[in-house]
Image (cartoon, rainbow, N blue to C red):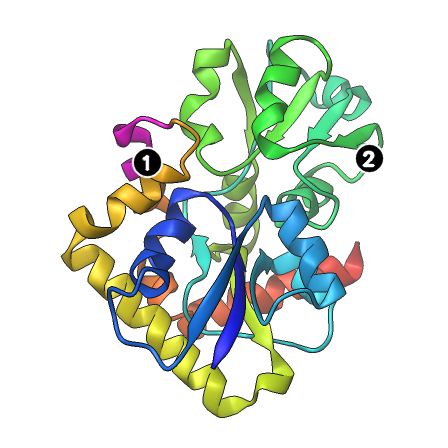
Amino acid sequence: MKLTLAYSTCPNDTFIFGALVNGLIDSPFTFEVILEDIKELNARAAQGGADVCKLSFYALTQLSGWTLLPAGAALGRGCGPLLVAREPLTHEQLIQSRIALPGWDTTAHLLLQYYAPEARNKAVMLFSDIMPAVAEGRADVGLIIHESRFTYPTHGLVCLQDLGDYWERRTGLPIPLGGIAAQTSLGAEAHAQLTDAIRRSLAFAWAHPDAVMPYVAQHAQELSEEVMWQHIRLYVNDFSLELGTEGQAAITQLQAVAAAT
């Protein structure tokens, strides 16, 4: 069976899927791969434009017709989005600032609403454009995700708030950022086969990193090897193999926050 599979160019996704889409493991599926930014992936999922899609957990709360797979997720501790600026700001200054977002329906935006519901002056940018926009004064504050948490100091920026830390202190739960969902219409058997394939692809990547890292580097937007590995080690963890009870509890809590927003 051939499926369309959409995920991001970020090292965690390419690391997880590298073995699967490059034929390094056996699979009952072949894939047409679509690589996009997270806001584009969320939009694609909303339009039903893929069979299997990475999307924000916040976006998933707003959609029907998708089934979350229990493998492949970006969920954990100490991995949340950051608010950054050119200089320290008070909370009052923050909520009056021009804030650049990576997407309206991203989990990062929901966490910003959870932390600072009064903030209203917001605009969406491609996630990789946010730090330059703040550094150049086109935005006052940036809501950054992915590998930006490792590189923002090189843009002369300071961290105002770790929104993941705020979430963890308030809820006691890990941060559910994004997951892999499949069209519900594919059926339970296909969902189980996809989950198994994702887990075997990830196991292969950890066992044979030299075989998948060229694929990761190909799509990593000129990130250094050190930053690629920092990204992978932070966002690819036990929850990527199995959401488990704690992961499901975090998603349920996020759904409750989304419903109250």
What amino acid does circle 1 point to? Met
Q: Is residue 126 or residue 33 the one in the foreground?
A: 33
What amino acid does circle 2 point to? Glu
Where residue 228 sits, quadrant-wise, is: top left
For marks 1 and 2, the one nearer the N-term is: 2
Residue 207 lies in the magenta-colored region: no
Residue picked out by circle 1: 228
Which image quarter is the C terminus in? bottom right
Label 2: few (<14), some or many (≥20) within 10 Å?
few
Q: Is residue 258 or residue 236 the one in the foreground?
A: 236
How many numbered markers are drawn? 2
Whole-percent x and y of residue 203? 23, 65
Question: Is residue 256 in sight in this rendering?
Answer: no
Whole-percent x and y of residue 129? 61, 25
> Which residue is at a point 41% across and 39% down the rendered structure image?
219
Q: CA distance from mark 1 to mark 2?
A: 35 Å
Whole-percent x and y of residue 214? 27, 42
> Which residue is at a point 47% across and 44% down the rendered structure image?
9
Residue 228 lies in the magenta-colored region: yes
Q: In this rendering, is residue 34 above or below 221?
A: below
Whole-percent x and y of residue 112? 68, 40
Which residues fall within the magenta stretch? 223-230
Mark 1–mark 2 contact, CB under 8 Å?
no
Identify the secondary structure beneath mark 2.
loop
Identify the secondary structure beneath mark 1.
helix
Residue picked out by circle 2: 118
Q: Is residue 36 left or right of residue 74?
A: right
Label 1: few (<14), some or many (≥20) within 10 Å?
many
Question: Is residue 165 in sight in this rendering?
Answer: yes
